Image (spheres, rainbow, N blue to C red):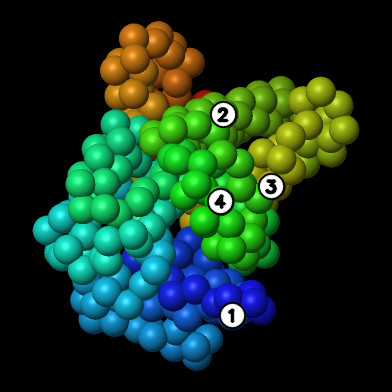
Amino acid sequence: MNQTPLRIAVLGTGMMGLPMARRLCQAGHQVHAWNRTPAKAEPLAADGARVHAQAADAARQADIVISLLENGGVVAQVLFEQGVAQAMAPGALFIDMASIQPSEARDHAARLGERGIAHLDAPVSGGTVGAEAGTLAIMAGGRPADYARAQPVFAALGRATHVGPHGAGQLAKLANQMIVGITIGAVAEALLFAAKGGADMAKVREAITGGFADSRILQLHGQRMVERNFAPRGRMTVQLKDMRNALATAREIGFDAPVTTLFEALYSAGVEHGLGGLDHSGLFVELASRNAMQ
C-alpha cells in the first residue's frame, strides 16, 4: 500500500478501465468509479471503490481523474459538457489514458489549463493482459512536474515513460498502434501464405520463433490465428479507429504514411464485412476470405 493514498476517479471502466481501477484499489488508493453503463462499474465496489451515477460526482471527490473513455469526442463531452472539468478542483490532475488524436489532447490540456487543472495524455499498450498484471507500457505527454506527480498512479499500472509535451503521449501510442496493426497483418498474411502452399501453420509459427521474424505479435496473436480464437481483447473497430487517427495526424503534420494507409483499408474492409466485434487479430479472417480459406 502507498504511504500516501490518493483519491482517484476513474471514468470509463470497460475492458481496460475495470482491471486498471481494480489495481489502483489494490494499491491502497481511494477510487471513485463511473461508467456510462453503470453495471460495468459496479463490480469495483467489491474492491473498495465507490461507484457514482454521474461522472462529475466521481471527479469532485478526486485529486487525480483518469479517463479511459472511447475516443476524443467522448472525452471532450464528459469533460466539458457533463461537468467533470467544472467539478474538478483547481490544482487537480487529469490523466487521459484513452487513445485519442494528439491535437485533441493538446486542446483538452489548454482548456483545462484555463481552469487551473493540470493535464497529461498517457495512453497505454499491453491490452487486458497487461492491465490485469500491472505491466502496461504507458506513454506520457505533458509537463515534467505533472508526470512526476502521477508516478504513484503509474506505478500500480505498469512502466511509464515521459515522451514529451502535451500530445506526445498520443503520438507515441499512434506509433505503437501503427506497428501493432501492420504487424498483425504481416503475421496473418505470412501464416495464410504458408498454409495455402501446404505447410502446417502452427509448425511454421513454431519454426520462425526465435528468429528475426519473431515478435510478441507472432507469439500472442499468431497463436490466436492458429487456434482461430478471435474473442475480443482489442477489437477490430478500435484498431481501425487508431489507424484513422494516425492518418489524420499524418495529414496534419505533412507526413506520407503509405503502409498505414494500406492497412487502414484492410481493417476497414474487415469491419464492413462484419468482423468489427472480433479481436484485431481477426484481420486474419478478412485475409483468409480473400484467399477462399476457412
Looking at marks 1 and 4 on the same chain, the residue that comes earlier in the sequence is marked by 1
108 and 260: which is toward the camera: 108
Judge depth for marks 1 and 3 and give the one in front. Answer: 1
Check disc 3: other Cα within 10 Å, few if <14, some if 14-19, many if 20+.
Answer: few
Q: Identify the image quadrant of residue 171.
A: top left
Across and down, in percent, residue 242 comes to: 40, 36
* Disc 4 element: helix
Residue under label 2: 179
Identified at 55% across, 77% down, the residue is: 5
Judge depth for marks 3 and 2 and give the one in front. Answer: 2
The answer to the question of whether label 3 and label 4 lie on touching residues, with beta carbons closer than 8 A, is: no
Across and down, in percent, residue 276 comes to: 37, 47
Residue under label 3: 220
143 and 261: which is toward the camera: 143
As shown in the figure, which amino acid type bears the numbered disc 1?
Gly
Identified at 56% across, 51% down, the residue is: 148
Looking at marks 2 and 1 on the same chain, the residue that comes earlier in the sequence is marked by 1
The answer to the question of whether label 1 and label 3 lie on touching residues, with beta carbons closer than 8 A, is: no
46 left or right of 56? right
| CA gap, disc 2 and disc 1 | 35 Å
68 left or right of 132? left
- The quarter of the picture where the N terminus appears is bottom right
* Disc 3 element: helix
Residue under label 4: 148
Identified at 41% across, 44% down, the residue is: 121
Judge depth for marks 3 and 4 and give the one in front. Answer: 4
40 and 57: which is toward the camera: 57
Looking at marks 3 and 4 on the same chain, the residue that comes earlier in the sequence is marked by 4
Judge depth for marks 1 and 4 and give the one in front. Answer: 4
As shown in the figure, which amino acid type bears the numbered disc 3?
Leu
176 left or right of 223? left
